[in-house]
Image (cartoon, helix red, strand yellow):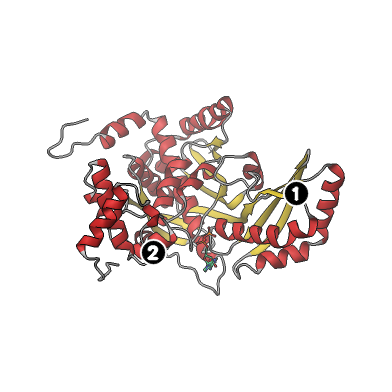
Amino acid sequence: MSNPIQLPTSRREELVRSLVRRELRFHELPKDLPAEEAAEIRRRALELMTQTPLDNIAHHSLDVQRASKRNCENFIGVAQVPMGVVGPLRVRGRCADGDFWVPLATTEAALVASTNRGCSAITHAGGAVVRVEDVGMTRAPVFRTSGIVQTQWFLQWIKDHDADIRKITEDTSRHLKLLEVRPYTFGTTVFLRFRFDSGDAMGMNMATIACDRAVNDLIEPATGVPCVALSGNYCVDKKPAAINFQEGRGKRIYAEVLLEAPILHHQLKSNARDLVEVQYRKNLLGSIAAGSMGFNAHYANVLAAFFIATGQDPAHVVEGSMGVTCIESRGPDSVFASIYMPDVPLGAVGGGTALDTQREALAMLGVSPDPERRGEAVTRLAEILGAVVLAGELSLMAAFTSQDLARAHEKLGRGEVPGQPLP
Ligand code: ADP
């Protein structure tokens, strides 16, 4: 929080001047400077360099010492994102079983209102059944061999030293368990795709550190086969990829709900026949026509808002946006709707989860890791996420059936702000 130590004004001005003149770079401010003081000096220099007042970026309640050490270098302040809430959302998961109010941080008008409508439909229907598989976090270093003979010898060595690789990787964290090392080779290139159970953490840093140790302290010295890059893009992190779709990554989430005619009519202003047709022509045929890996209406919207609110890495929305929404006809007037998300990196500790607003958001959801119940906190988070993504899908799909989409955006995204002209 705010640090009592204040630099004498002259020293502060001297540092600001050095930054402005580029004699000093932003990360070169004295190490013993309190983090808040350093942020203020960077901001002042930026104000002078860009002729832009930065009062709003300066205004926040973050623990700067922590945020600038753990989350963001060259810290200058915050970007504020509006946060809304949806719910009550009834979730029938293994770790999340009950009604939840879910925070969503977004700048996209209509997203919260629309998702809230989906929550209402799900809750009236008795809740979404959600299940989560912990696939594990992956990292795949890439190696260069001299050809087939060395590749075969190398892969046999990896197999024969499974116990040593397990020990060296698991020694890097008591929360990490090695699940698999999967090789993939062509030409003179070998990928080893390591897959870890990382407890309640999303695990990307943990997996990277563990792979680094295994490669540098064991595999390279013992085999002489050089590692070209610790991440060989066969992981696959933050890129949409068929292997992640098929094999999964992070959490694999399934959620479903049966919606009968009154709920379709009253909550969603829709009907079974139109929903099934939009599902078929849009999510299925449209995605095929486009060569898309996202056979869904908008997982990315809900994911991004949920990720920002709860301290996840927003870049993982790229992979999380893959998946399949199904809406099947049940009887003449009902639908059975489900979502399948094969690749959702998610954490209840680590990353941005310890930041002040993100911690509050997680607490609202009752997500708090317990050493006695490994992985339950993150599973609970994943189950709530699955239900809220399903809510977002149902509402948007229903909006298409009633031609409501543009009208809702017009009304909610272009609302009148007192004292400001309409856009
Ligand atoms: P990540 O590896 O998820 O990218 P971090 O680099 O912040 O994120 O690592 C997560 C940290 O949280 C690790 O240092 C790990 O030891 C710690 N940790 C504390 N409690 C737990 C838990 N219950 N499960 C997993 N990790 C935990």
Position above or below: 279 against 303: above
Most extreme residue toward the top, as rendered?
289
Task: Give the spatial CA distance, label 1 vs label 2.
Answer: 43 Å
Q: Hey, what amino acid is under mark 2?
A: Lys
Numbered disc 2: secondary structure: loop
Report if the beta carbon of the residue with label 1 is closer than 8 angstroms to ligand 1: no
For residue 183, the mark is 1
Q: Which residue is mark 2?
A: 31
Can residue 416 be seen in the rendering of this structure? yes
Q: How many marks?
A: 2
Residue toward you, 208 or 295: 208
Report if the beta carbon of the residue with label 2 is closer than 8 angstroms to ligand 1: no
Q: Earlier in the sequence, mark 1 or mark 2?
A: 2
Can residue 63 be seen in the rendering of this structure? no
Number of other residues with Cα within 10 Å of mark 1, as a class: few under 14, some 14 to 19, many 20 or more: some
Q: Position of residue 263 (x, y in %)?
A: 40, 43
Q: Position of residue 280 (x, y in %)?
A: 54, 30
